[in-house]
Image (cartoon, rainbow, N blue to C red):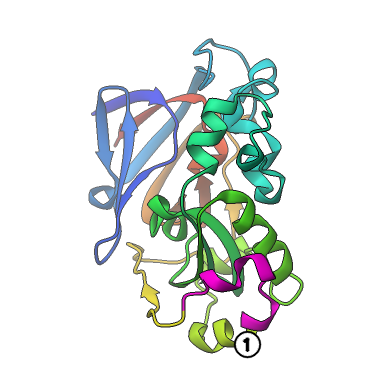
Amino acid sequence: MQYQGVLKKMQTENTNPVNYYLIMGNDFLHMNQLIDKEVHIEFIGYQCLACGENKKIYRQGYCYDDFYKVPQAADWIMKPELSKAHLDIEDRDLAYEKKVQLQPHIVYLANSSNVKVGVTRKTQVPTRWIDQGAHEALEIVEVPNRYLAGITEIALKEHVSDKTNWRKMLKNDIEDVNLIAHREALKEYIPEEAKSYFIADNDETHIHFPVSKYPEKLKTLNLDKTPAYDGVLKGVKGQYLIFEDDTVFNVRSWEGYVVRISLL
């Protein structure tokens, strides 16, 4: 059976374990059902997520030209503290920026390899944590716009990491920690503008991933260097496919690439 389509990040359901779906054109693959089965992945071409043309992907699923034009790739996406829609100031597309930035945002703690602080729209909870491969997470601040979330993250990352060690996450080299205790320790560092939005009475969210075997010595699948690959799928964590030979494939890193997937 073959499927062909442009890669986009997998859709998820926070069940136990998480259900993963890879959308392929008008069809989809339920990745959980492919665990312990042999899969063939073959690079076919490109399809920019903005213009739809077969142009080499530059970053985040976009061709070079569109990466520097579309609001979905603007600097405030990765650096929320640069958001300006609350000031009625346009970056690339004020209507889009208002739609995304002027809605409730969560500053959270997540543990995927270590405790880290992060920002996401409220509507993306718990999807954001699943995509990061976090096995536990906790909301600590809920603010009305992206800018406030960004400056809160900036303040807190002076005291806790804002990075994930993806190798430790994929090896499941993790430990459970008391995120509530971390929240209380960080409370005093929240900026004055966001202190009133502190969340004091919620519980941790725990996430379980569909993995039957974790890798020991990681090898990353690079479609530019290896346009065709066969492997037995052993699990999915974050946005990574994990294979029996310790190869891992980050679906999100290859957005905009058109692939053919065959079940062998």
Q: Nearer the viewer, residue 39 or 78?
A: 78
- The percent position of residue 27, horizontal first and vertical second, equals 24, 27
- Most extreme residue toward the right is 158
Please determine whether, in this image, residue 184 is positioned above or below residue 42: below
**Residue located 59% across and 62% down the image:** 118
Q: Is residue 196 magenta?
A: yes
- The percent position of residue 98, horizontal first and vertical second, equals 53, 35
Q: Amino acid at mark 1?
A: Ala
Q: Which residue is mark 1?
A: 185
Q: Quadrant of the N terminus?
A: top left
Question: Would residue 75 appear left or right of 223 to someone viewing this image?
Answer: right
- Tag 1 secondary structure: helix
Please determine whether, in this image, residue 47 is positioned above or below residue 163: above
Q: Main secondary structure of the magenta part?
A: helix
Q: Is residue 130 magenta?
A: no
- The percent position of residue 90, horizontal first and vertical second, equals 67, 28
Question: Would residue 68 appear left or right of 52 to someone viewing this image?
Answer: right
Where on the picture, by quarter, is residue 72? top right
**Residue located 52% across and 32% down the image:** 255
Please determine whether, in this image, residue 117 is positioned above or below residue 19: below
* Magenta segment: 187-199
Whether residue 111 is visible here, answered yes or no, is no
Q: Quadrant of the C terminus?
A: top left
